[in-house]
Amino acid sequence: MKDHSLKREVLLFSGLLLLVLLIMSVMGSAYGIRMLVEAACYSLIALGLTMQWGYAGLFNAGILGFIAVGGFMSMLFSYPVNEDFWHSDMPAQLGMVVLKAAVGIAIIYALAKSARWGMPKRLQTPLLVIVSAIVYLMLVNILDPVTRTIESEAGFIGGFGFPVWTGWTGWIVGGALAGTIAYFIGHICLGLRSDYLAIATLGIAEIIKAFLKNADWLTRGILTVSPLPWPVPEPVDVGFVLARALYLSVIVCLIVVTYFLLQRALHSPWGRMMRAIRDNEISSLAMGKDVNKRRLQVFVLGSVLMGIGGAALTTFNGIFDPSGFIPLNHTFLIWVMVILGGAGNNRGAIFGAVFVYIIWTMSEPVALVIFDLVRDLGEKWFSWQAPADLDSRALQARVFVIGLIITMVLRYAPKGLIPEKIAQHS
């Protein structure tokens, strides 16, 4: 059984390698390496999802939000400093708003914990709601004039302008911020059913996107921020192929380290406990396991990986565009990658991410070739006049192909092409 599984994995990865080589020979090395870099970034995100879904059975429908947070922090750390902003009194005004927000949050937190000091519950809850509303309205009232001043006089606050070689620190901070947001979401929702978690994460993701899209003073909104510097030599210095190859090597190193750590965690007592909680929550509770706390751990760790992957992907694309984060590309596609590869199997997640992204990328050019062939043969043999918008329909072919693939996989390999390996003990 073990040999059969190993042979299957070798065949699948060998076929994937041949597919990559074929694309590079047809489309060129620069195109092929770019595709691999983006697929590698998606692999990191897929590893985060396989932690949440494969290890613990947590249904995260808000992957988009964590990717966007990672991308934003990457932009904030690496983009050059806006002199118009920093050489004015606007940073001091903004700092005062942040200070007042911190005081307001501290008051709300103290009220939330006031039951420990003897405040009756029936008084605590309405008081907490009223104070939270007052703090929010006050913050909005003092933040609005400051943001209007920033937008009119400086455009936006710009970035921190960290040295290029430290650009990856924005990735780490982006992952940490994504994990922090996941902590608060999970702290509230993980005690509920999985469908409530899906609804909550979906809502939070849309809130994050709406905030980034409308906070012009912070992100330039729909005007986008570009170009974002890379943490490796850029194409203008060393050429497209070498620059992309260097970027790919950085991401591959990151994946190798992440894979090693995840494998260690998966086969440790912690990993076995997570699978036990996923498979039988009641038995785990009876064994004295703190189910919600363990789920919160894996939810936060998976979100950290999503944030790092989102930061790496945004940096590589060289542009931060809040409108560019869409559920089809940044949530649905990643679910397809994990389901096709095999939930709960790290190699399956990496295989699924690379394979699905290749299919996603190549569907349009392949569809264009097929459409051209059909148009030529139709005109030649049947005097058929193709619709004028036939080429524009090629873009939709990728959705059809992905839908067809996921249907076939669910029908013939419901556990994925590289399913989870469960150790059997006699």
Image: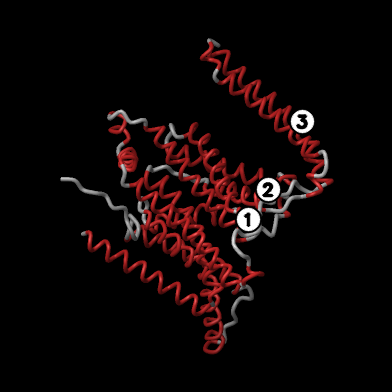
Residue at x 51% of width, y 49% of height: 306
Q: Amino acid at mark 2?
A: Lys
Callout 3 crowding tier (Cα within 10 Å): few <14, some 14–19, many ≥20 = few
Provide residue 183's location: percent of width, then percent of height.
51, 36
Of pointers 2 and 3, the one earlier in the residue sequence: 3
User: Which image quadrant for residue 405?
Assistant: bottom left
Provide residue 394's location: percent of width, then percent of height.
56, 71
Q: Amino acid at mark 3?
A: Asn
Horizontal side, residue 24 vs residue 126: left or right = left
Residue at x 35% of width, y 50% of height: 263
- Residue to which mark 2 is pinned: 213
Dot 3 falls on a residue whose secondary structure is helix
- Residue to which mark 1 is pinned: 324
Residue at x 78% of width, y 44% of height: 86
Mark 2 and mark 3 residues within 8 Å of each other at the beta carbon: no
Callout 2 crowding tier (Cα within 10 Å): few <14, some 14–19, many ≥20 = many
Of pointers 1 and 2, the one earlier in the residue sequence: 2
- Residue to which mark 3 is pinned: 141
Dot 1 falls on a residue whose secondary structure is helix
Task: Give whichever of 117, 247 is nearer the camera.
Answer: 247
Q: Separation of disc 1 and disc 3 at Cα?
A: 30 Å
Q: Separation of disc 1 and disc 2 at Cα?
A: 10 Å
User: Which image quadrant for residue 295?
Assistant: top left
Callout 1 crowding tier (Cα within 10 Å): few <14, some 14–19, many ≥20 = some
